[in-house]
Image (cartoon, helix red, strand yellow):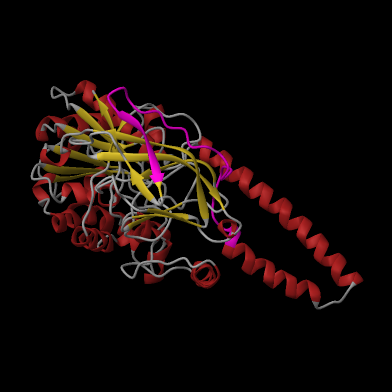
Amino acid sequence: MNGRKQQLLKRHRRNKRIALLMALLALVLLGVLVAWWLPPLLLALGWVAHEAWFADHLFYSPRDDYRYDFPADCLSVPVRLEQGVLRVEADLAGHDTLILELRLKATWLGRWLDPHVLLGSDRQDFERGVAGRRYLNLSGQQVDGLAIAPRFCRIEGELRLHAMRNPDFAAQRMLIIAPHADDAELAAFGQYSRSPGAAIVTLTQGEIEAEHYQRLGLDKAAAARLKGRLRAWDSLAAPLWGGVPQMRCVQLGYYCLQLPAMAEQPDKPFGSRESGESDIRSVRAHNPLRLPADADGQPTWHNLVADLAAVIDHYRPEVLLTPHPELDPHHDHVASTRAVLEACERSSWRPQTLLLYANHLHDNDRWPMGPAGNGIALPPAIAALPADRLWSPSLGAERQLDKAMALGLQHDLQGPLPLKRRLRRLIQRVLVGRRWPATGEDEFFRKAVRRHELFWVRSR
C-alpha cells in the first residue's frame, strides 16, 4: 500500500476502535442497569451485524461523486431512458468502449442490500447507500434499446454516454509487466490469451507472507524460499494455459515489497525481507534470454531498469501493459511502472502505447463489486485522474472460465479461507444475498473473472 491508502486504513481503524469502545461502555451500563445477559446477547448480534453490513473497507462516502474526465476524441452525447429502455440517437459505429454516466440514489433497502443495475444480460453493483455520479460499462452490448433496470436504487437526473474508439491492442505485440506472479492473469488473461505476440515479464518472486508453508515443518526463511520458487515457477508456467509459451515469459527475481526502497537508493542491493536471499539469479535459470543483472545477481534499481530495457529491446512490443500509477496503490505496482518508464527512456525501442490496469484500489477493496461474471463498472475516482481513453474488451463465458482456471494455477490464490472469513461469507450470503463463485475461494476469483477487462490508454 502507498502512503494515501495507509492513512485511509489508519483512520478507518481508529474510528472503528472509538466506536467499539463506546459500544462496550454502553453494553456495560446495560448489564448493570437492566440485565446481566443482555450485553452478551447484544454483543453477538452486533458482531453479526458488523460482518454483514460494516465489514467492507470503504474509505470514502458512498454519497461522493466519482470524478472522470474523458479525452477530446471521446464522443460524449446525452441519452434518455424511456420506460426502462435506453435510447441513443448518435452513430456509435466503430466505438468499442461505451460508458454510461448517471446518478444513482439508493432506496431504503439499498442501504442494507447491494444496489445494482441490470443492463440487458449484465449486472453492475455499487456501494450500499450510494447517492452520486457513477459510470456503467456498456461495452460489448447493443446500447440503443438496451433494457436498464435499477435494483435497490433509483436513476436520477440526466444520462450521458461516453463512446471511445480503439484499435484491437491484442492484435499488436504486447508486453505485460507483472509486479508479481498472477498480476498478468488478473489484469489481462483475456487479452494475452488471444494475442499471438504477447510476452510477460514478472519482476518479483513474491516470497513474503509464507506462513502457510511453515505448516510443512519449515522455518520462516525456508518457507519464504519455497514460496518464492513456487511463484517464480507460476509466472513461467501458468501463461502457457493462455497460449503464451515459456520462451516469451521472463522472471526477473527481485524481492517482494523491496522495489520502492530500491528506487530511492538505486545503487544499493535490497535482499529479501524474509527468505534470507540476496541473489536474484536463484530463479532465473529458465529465462529465455540473458539479462544485464545475470552478471552479478544484485537486487538493485539500476539492474532492474537495465533488465527491463533489455526485455523491451528483445520483444519490441508495440503495447506495454503496466499498473496504473494513480489508481493502483500497491507499493510494488507503483514502483514497477516507474521502472518501466525509466526503462523505456533507456531502451532503443519505443513502445507506442501504455495500457494501464488496476488490480488494487486506494478506496474500495471490493471493486469490482458484485458477483463474478458480470461487467466492470468504472472504479471509484474521488480525486481527479488524467483524462485517459478507456479500452474495455469483452470476455465470453468460455474465456472467463479459462481465466478462472489460470488463477487456480497460481499458488498464492490457493488454500482455504481463514475461519473468520468463512463465517463472514456465510453471514453475508444469508443476510445480504452475496454470492461467490465455485471456481475458487480467493476474493480475486470474484473480482477478476468478469465479462470485461478494463484498461486506461496512454500514448507515448
Residue 72: say if magenta: yes
Residue located at (50% from left, 58% from top): 114
Overall secondary structure of the magenta section: loop
Q: Return the x and y of residue 2 as percentages of the image width and height.
A: 47, 37
Relative to 122, does residue 216 appear above or below in the rendering?
below
Residue farthest to the front?
A: 83
Q: Is residue 271 left or right of residue 250?
A: right
Q: Is residue 131 left or right of residue 266?
A: right
Q: Return the x and y of residue 395 as percentages of the image width and height.
A: 22, 53
Relative to 122, does residue 255 appear above or below in the rendering?
above
Relative to 32, does residue 71 appear above or below in the rendering?
above
Nearer to me, 68 or 317: 68
Residue 74: say if magenta: yes
Residue located at (52% from left, 67% from top): 428
Residue 437 visible in the current orientation: yes
Residue 298 visible in the current orientation: no
**Viewport quadrant of the C terminus:** top left
Quadrant of the image occupied by residue 392: top left
Range of residues picked out in magenta = 53-81
Q: Return the x and y of residue 153 as percentages of the image width and height.
A: 52, 53
Q: Return the x and y of residue 434 as percentages of the image width and height.
A: 47, 65
